[in-house]
Image (cartoon, helix red, strand yellow):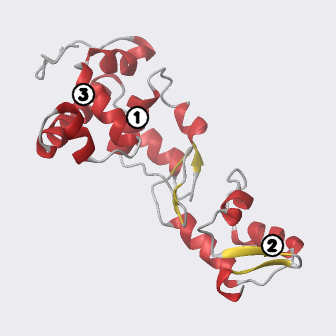
Amino acid sequence: MNYQENPSPSNEPLGGSDWLDDAWQAMPDRWDTIVDRRLAGDTLDRIAEAFDLTRERIRQLQQKAEAALVDAQRHNAPDLPQQITEALADHAAVPEDQLAELLPSRASTARQALFRQLGASRPRTWSGDLPGHWTHRPAALDTLLRKLVALAPMTDAETQQAIQDIGLPAHVRIEDLLRNPESRLTHHRLGWIRTART
């Protein structure tokens, strides 16, 4: 493993549409491992233990890795932040595939880390962050789901109509969210009712 911690940045563009892959590959091995583990939900303490470092040192290395990605973006794709802002607009959830079209890359972890650094977040729901989607308004989807809960009890047909009327994103699998153990609704033979009423 290469544990160099201060690679000298190049003043030349990394070139083509592979600049993010190149920037990711140029990082010291533990930098990308730390970013990957943090995005997967690992705590600073667990990563610090694995590397036999302090949690503060892990945080510093994560920041260095993310700063290197942002530096590469500024040099190679200065319009990317504006493109992301336009793609996310005020939507509660935008599919990751749609956002990924702005930044084709084999390094999906690097792309996710860069999206976060450029202000994108995962939409929040009662079951946690919604994977596979991005937004500038992380609480917006949760707010829409709460509006749905407030309408219960509802038949299945009424629920489907309410999902459309409220404006819940069509590409989000709302039924999966409703059936999640953390859901505020539960399915009954007559339709959907609030969990507290069971």
Label 3: how many Cα within 10 Å (few below 14, some 14–19, many 20+) = many
Marks 2/1 in contact by CB < 8 Å: the verdict is no
Q: Residue 73 appears at what percent x and percent y?
A: 32, 28
Residue 141 in picture, x, y percent from top left: 57, 64
Q: Is residue 32 left or right of residue 193?
A: left
Residue 54 at x, y = what percent? 11, 42
Which residue is disc 3 drawn over? Answer: 31
Q: Amino acid at mark 2?
A: Thr
SS for callout 3: helix
Q: Mark 2: give few (<14), some (14-19) or many (20+) Cα within 10 Å.
A: some
Specify the amino acid type for callout 3: Trp
* Res. 159 mark: 2
Kind of residue at disc 1: Leu
Spatial distance from mark 2 to mark 1, Cα to Cα? 38 Å
Instruction: For marks 3 and 2, give the one nearer the viewer.
Output: 3
Dot label at residue 80: 1
